Amino acid sequence: MNEPIMQNMNSMPEKKSRGPLVGSIVIIVLLIAGGIYFFMSQKQIMDQNSEATPETDKLDIQSSSDDIDSIDADIKATDMSNLDQGTY
């Protein structure tokens, strides 16, 4: 009497759950999107901090010589009064 029921249960294909696979794909996509967002925001901060200022423009006119007198003249010409300006 139980044989026909058992045969019906054995003949039905086993359904596989795709939930864990879909969940893993969603998590990977979210991690990638978060990484891209973080990278772009850090790049934007770096671009803001790298703007040329009159102080940084003065560095371009310093001597490239390595003799003592040139180094001393560059040190004396450098304005270090606002050295910590712009730090957070």
Image (cartoon, rainbow, N blue to C red):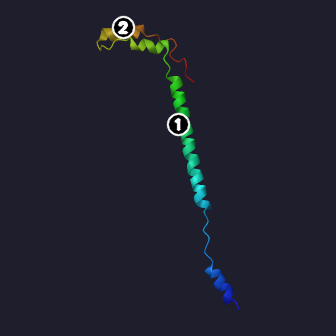
Separation of marks 2 and 1 at Cα, in angstroms: 41 Å
Q: Amino acid at mark 1?
A: Phe
**What is the residue that sits farthest to the bottom in this orientation?**
1
Q: Is residue 50 above or below residue 24?
A: above
Marker disc for residue 73: 2
The C terminus - image quarter: top right
| Residue at 55% from the left image edge and 19% from the top image edge | 86
* Viewer-nearest residue: 64 or 82: 64
Tell me residue 36's x, y (percent): 54, 40
Residue displayed at 32% across by 9% down: 70
Q: Is residue 58 above or below residue 51?
A: above
Q: Amino acid at mark 2?
A: Ala
Residue at far right of view: 1
Q: Which residue is mark 1?
A: 39
Q: Secondary structure at mark 2?
A: helix
Q: Is residue 72 above or below residue 44?
A: above
Which secondary structure, mark 1? Answer: helix
Q: Give the image quarter of residue 58.
A: top left
User: Looking at the image, is mark 2 or mark 1 nearer the viewer?
Assistant: 1
Q: Position of residue 40 (x, y in %)?
A: 54, 34
Q: Which mark is residue 2?
A: none
